[in-house]
Amino acid sequence: MSYEIGTGSRASDLPADYPSPRIVILGATGAGKSSLANVLLGRDKNYEGGKFENGCFRVSTGLDSITKDTCADQGYWVGDKDNQMFTVVDTPGFGDQLVEEEKTIENLVMTLRDEIKYVHVFILAFKQSDNRMTNSLRSMISLFEKMFGKKFWDNAILEATHWNHGEDAIRIRNDSNPPLTEEFWRDEFNNILKREYSLQKGLKAVFIDTFHHDESRHEVEVFANNSKLLWQYAISREPFECKDIEIALTEIRELQNQVDNLVDEEEAKDIEITELEQQRDQLQSALIQYQLASTTSQPSHLHGSYCTLNKCYTSSEFTLLGVGAAVLGILLGVLLISWYKQQCLPDEREEILERKRGLAHQHSILARDGREPSDIFCSRDSDGQLETVSEMSEHSLVQLVGEKATSAQ
């Protein structure tokens, strides 16, 4: 079976050192990229790498990535010299250690941009069991999109590796719920890509089993049909230019960088806070010393601020305070004297009346004895009682009464 290059590849426009179409295989560690590349070149699926170094095209049975560099090789499609020559690029696998794989990413970008320059097909290789979008796969696909841009989806195709086409494998897949058919796997993966990466249209998928049995006519036929689908897709694509590929950071690295930046910012803020606290302490110490100095000697230009802090008063204010205190003292003295007089001194009117009563009594004694002093003028009421005493000095009246009492004895 021979394959010819299609017009969409425009091979005449491309450099001659790498025949077209040019196929790049991308995928996670252990997906079977190197094995697929060897089978497409017509080599044994367990090829040991030959002349290539750093694990290129070398198949490993372990979980660690053997391929460390990005390597390109060329040959006839599925090893048939009647077919067209093409170029296949084996790439390192990406796993959970994407942060440590920066050199690998840089090497991939440099090789595609500076050596390969044009790519017709990006094969996204996933295991049959990779029907869930893990963090590793999500970060890996995001990395591809950031490196190549959204246009690379136009040249991408899905490959389900380890998809055994034997009768027992088909029966097991069909017995699952829901049945794991080729259509179901392709649609599920496209749904994930549309949801996660806003993919506008679904990608085509091939199911090339690199470990198919050569003695099984059915498996050989299925292998041939799927490899032919991949070839037809490759020759129908416009070449993707790699000149704009950028060395992108993975999401894990970006998150790590954000964490590092936050830690640096926090340390810088802590240093700034410490410096501000030291400045505050210095200012407080200087202010205390300044206040002590102002208390002992106040310069005239500092009087206003000192008095604001210490509530000092002017001479006029002191004079007004003294006058106010004197007036208040006088008022308090008058009130105190008045109170003392009321509480401690006898009532003058009561004293005069008492004296009048005493004189009236003496007068009644004199009248009873038939002696009525001519120099005492009294008035009596209707009952004959003494009512008033003529205006005579109190001293004279007492003296007169005393003399008459003596003569009466």
Image (cartoon, helix red, strand yellow):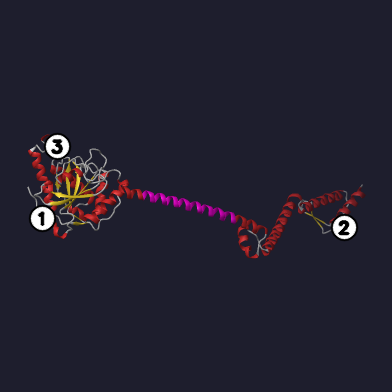
Q: Nearer the viewer, mark 3 or mark 1?
A: 1
Three-letter amino acid code of the residue under disc 3: Arg
Q: Nearer the viewer, mark 2 or mark 3?
A: 3
**Tags 3 and 1 touching, CB below 8 Å:** no
Crowding around mark 3 (Cα neighbors within 10 Å: few <14, some 14 to 19, many 20+) is: some
Three-letter amino acid code of the residue under disc 2: Asp
Residue depicted at 12% across the width and 46% down the height: 79
Q: Nearer the viewer, mark 2 or mark 1?
A: 1
The alpha-carbon separation of the residues under discs 3 and 1 comes to 36 Å
Q: Which residues are magenta?
A: 258-286
Query: How far across and down, in percent of the image, does residue 303 sit?
Result: 64, 63
Magenta region includes residue 125: no
The alpha-carbon separation of the residues under discs 2 and 3 comes to 160 Å
| Residue highlighted by disc 3 | 173
What label sits on residue 6 in the rendered view? 1
Three-letter amino acid code of the residue under disc 1: Gly
**Tags 2 and 3 touching, CB below 8 Å:** no
Q: In terms of depth relative to the viewer, which is nearer, 90 or 52?
A: 52
